Image (cartoon, rainbow, N blue to C red):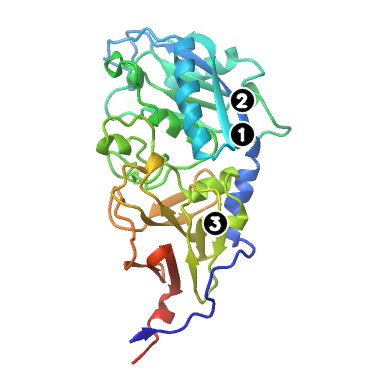
Amino acid sequence: MGLVALAACSGTHAELPPAVQAVADAGAKSRWMTRGDDPWVVFVCHVPAGSQVPDYAGLPLRFPLKPDAIASILDDKVTAYFTTLSNGDYRPSFTPGGEVAIGPTDEPQVCVDKAIAASDDNAHGVFVVADAEHNEGRPGGFGNPGAVCAKPPCAATTTRRSAYVGASDFSPDWGDRPPMDLIEHEIGHAIGWPHSGYDESLPVPEQSALDVMSNSAAPRDVLPERRDAPDTLAINRLGAGWLPASAVAVVPRDGSTVTLAASKSTSGTRLAVIALDDRRFIAVELLTADGFDDHLPASGVAVHLIEGSNSTRTQTPLVGLAPYTDLLIPGETLTSNGWRVAVGDGWRVTMQPVEAVSTVSG
């Protein structure tokens, strides 16, 4: 028994479907933040020993953090991470700003507010590190791309663009190799990326090991010496302007076969998309088990359901169970949302509507 012949033997680089184009359009509004040099200024926030807010309450340790030392680490490690991630398209830089202090009833956001007020017009973003750790069960940090910039580039004092983390990643226990994964995750939010593999009903909602915007510490679970986050998804690259529309194969309604290049590479078809409606699509890409994804057990094809277009869009892994590292390899298939995705040799991926697959000849 064999499958019916496909109407199209290869994917087309036609006009992006509305749901995919919406992601690209939303990212275009922030392109000044995601292309070229992006200056950040670093502040340390002093939290009083008697803080009463849930993030800090009852934690006595205060670390002697200095903005210049933190900025030096970030400018080395985080800059290198994003330069590699973007294939040189995005280069954040970090310089010391100063120190601020909050009161016993002040939330972490007050740290950010005071740092923004103390920053100058040269900073596109403000990065704040508290000198106190966060309590278990509280978020380790947050990032905010800020308001839309009318005449870019704009200062953080105008957009309120920022990122914040507690002191845990700068504990002396890490020695001279503090982890950068959470910081990279929060910078991801500050360039407009949403969570992926996120289930807010769970105590640890970030469930996916496939994206810096999910479980950013996933590589350390496999390789304890790792300090950077995983790589990111092709759809995030598209939104950031690091992946051109010409690298996206649009699958027609009757299906097609596409040969995928690694989504982090610089040439070839790096993303295939299947439009479901004007707000939803399936994203198909090849992740290779090297570089920032060297924690993956093997290279394979990842499939995600993308819903929505802006920083609140959901990006749900469709292959396997958390942490979703059992990717599709040659000979394997996935059926989801009315489509069948089959992986062949050479990373040739055939995508067909289910009704076409069910039409077979004897």
Say if residue 53 shows up in the picture.
Answer: no
**Is residue 29 positioned above or below 160 on the image?**
below
Q: Which residue is mark 1?
A: 33
> Which amino acid is tagged 1?
Met
Quarter holding residue 226:
top left
Quarter holding residue 63:
top left
Give the alpha-carbon distance from disc 1 to disc 2, as whole Å. Answer: 8 Å
Left or right of residue 332, residue 152 in this image: right
Describe the element under mark 3 as helix, strand or loop.
Answer: loop
> Which amino acid is tagged 2?
His
Q: As rendered, which of 299 and 90 lies closer to the eye? A: 299
Tell me whether circle 1 and circle 2 mark residues in contact (CB < 8 Å): yes
How many other residues sit within 10 Å of disc 3, few (<14), some (14-19) or many (≥20)? some
Say if residue 133 shows up in the picture.
Answer: yes
Q: Which residue is mark 3?
A: 268
Describe the element under mark 2 as helix, strand or loop.
Answer: loop
Q: Determine the residue positioned at 65% across, 42% down.
A: 29
Give the alpha-carbon distance from disc 2 to disc 3, as whole Å. Answer: 33 Å
Q: As rendered, which of 264 and 155 lies closer to the eye? A: 264
| Label disc, if present, on residue 124 of the rendered structure | 2
Q: Position of residue 137 (x, y in %)?
A: 28, 30
Q: Nearer the viewer, mark 2 or mark 3?
A: 3
